[in-house]
Image (cartoon, rainbow, N blue to C red):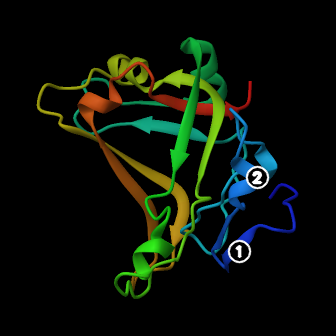
Amino acid sequence: MSTEPADMTVHSSRPYNAEPPRTALAGRDLTPVEVFYHRNHAVERPRIDPATWSLRADGLVGRPATWTLDELRVRFTEHAEVVTLQCAGNRRAGLTEVADLPGETPWGPGATGTARWSGVRLADVLRESGVEPAATDVAFTGADVSAEPDQPEPYAVSVPLEKALAPEVLLACSPGR
C-alpha cells in the first residue's frame, strides 16, 4: 500500500478498507494516489507479478485467447481516460442514520476518487475475441479471494456487453500516465 495520511478513516484492516477525509478530495481535479480510497473484499491483497499475469477471454467468443500484460500493450492501442470511481457504499453512514444496515461498512463521503488511467479498450479485446451475438454480459473474475461468503471464492463482477463495448471502458494497465 502507498503511504497514507494519518487522517484516513480505516473501516477494517483485514480486509483493508479506508477512505480519506472530505477535505483531502476537495479542490482537486485528480485525487492524489496517497488519498485514494481503498476497497478490498479479500483479506489478503493479491500479489500480481506483471511478468506472469495474463487475461483470458473465453465463453461466448469465437476465438478464445489469452494475453500477457506485455502482449496487450503491444497488440492493442493504449488510451487514457480520466475516470471517477466510487464505492457502491459511498455515504452509507448517512443511510444508517435512517435505517440499520447490519454487516455493511459505514462509508462516509470519501469512497470516491478521480484519476487518469491508461490501458487498452475492453471493446478492442472483445472484438479480437469475436464476441458472439448471444452474449449479453462480460464477466470478470479477479485474483482476490473473498472470505465473506461461507466458502471463500474469487471476487467476480459482470458488466452489460453494451457498456463493455463503450470506448471509455479500459482494461487499465496503469494509473496516472
Q: Disc 1 designates what residue?
A: 10
SS of the residue under disc 1: strand
- Percent position of residue 17, x then y: 64, 69
Going by the numbered disc 2, the residue's amino acid type is: Ala
The secondary structure type at the circle numbered 2 is helix
Q: Quadrant of the N terminus?
A: bottom right
Judging depth in this view, the residue of 86 and 130 nearest the camera is 86
Residue found at x 59% / y 25%: 119
**Residue 23 falls in image quadrant:** bottom right
Q: Earlier in the sequence, mark 2 or mark 1?
A: 1
Residue at numbered disc 2? 24
The residue closer to the viewer here, 2 or 30, is: 30
**Do the residues bearing badges 2 and 1 touch, measured as CB atoms within 8 Å?**
no
Q: Position of residue 47 (x, y in %)?
A: 71, 57
Give the number of marks.
2
Left or right of 175, for residue 6: right
In the depicted structure, whether residue 138 falls above or below residue 141: above
Number of the label disc, if any, that sits on residue 135: none
Query: Badge 2: how crowded within 10 Å, few (<14), some, or many (20+)?
Result: some
